[in-house]
Structures are given as structure tokens and as C-alpha cells.
Amino acid sequence: MPTSEIKTLEEFKQFASYHFKVLDAETNGSDGCVHKIKVAGYSDMMGLGLNLIKMCLEIIQMENLDNTDVDIGSVLELALQMFPRAELEVLDEIHLMLISEAPKKI
């Protein structure tokens, strides 16, 4: 629908909903939005997070770069979101179960 054909609020909402596909409103009631990033799996997601952190370290260590050019804090925030905290807790529980059942070495 061309913008010149929009006459009502409903037509505008329909037009806007067709074009705004990248961000979704958070379902937990906060004011934020969510953007989904496709990854091949947990390893890929962790690798992406680690690469973001490595990139920040490289930027911090560069002497000739004005660090105001890059918002390192926001990149690190994104990297933190890549770490699957709940899944890591499950791995800890599984690890504890395995070591508690393992025969004791003398």
C-alpha cells in the first residue's frame, strides 16, 4: 500500500506492521524489544559471544584508536546475552551427579 493511500489509523497500523519485522516487543512486560539472532547451536552461540569479547579486548588494546569510536559497553552487553545461563546451571548439576557417582580414586 503506497503511503499516499493511507487515510485511517487502522490503515497506518497495517502498513507499519508489514514493514516493522525485525524487533518484537518483550513478552515479560518490560519496555524493551527483542531481536532474534539465528545460530547453528549452543557452540555457535558461545563462539559468537567469545568473538565479541575478543573484539572488545582488541579495541581496548589498540593504542591509536579513540575508544569513543566504539561503544564497547554495548558490544559486551550483547556478548553477555549470548551466554546460556540456565543451560550452564543444568550442566553444573549433571557434572555434580557424575562426580558423586564416580568411584573414588585412592
Image: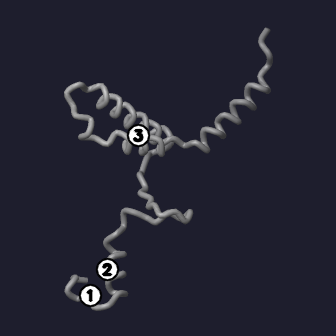
Q: Residue at x 37, y 42 (%)?
A: 75
Relative side of 76 to 104, left or right: left
Which residue position holds label 3?
76
Instruction: Please identify the quarter of the rendering in which residue 79 is found.
Output: top left
Q: Which mark is nearer the camera, 3 or 2?
A: 3
Say which residue appears at 42% left-offset and 34% top-offset: 50
Q: Secondary structure at mark 1?
A: loop
* Residue 44 position in % (x across, y down): 44, 40
- Please rate how many residues cluster around mark 1, counting C-alpha atoms within 10 Å: few if below 14, some from 14 to 19, many from 20: some
Q: Give the residue at x 31% y 72%.
A: 19
Quadrant of res 86:
top right
- Which residue position is annotated with label 1? 6
Q: Are marks 1 and 3 in contact (CB under 8 Å)?
A: no
Tell me the amino acid under the disc marked 1. Ile
At label 3, the amino acid type is Leu
Q: Quadrant of the N terminus?
A: bottom left
- The x, y position of residue 5, in whole percent, is 23, 88
Q: SS for tag 3?
A: helix
Residue 73: image location, x then y, percent: 38, 41
As drawn, which residue projects farthest toward the top? 106
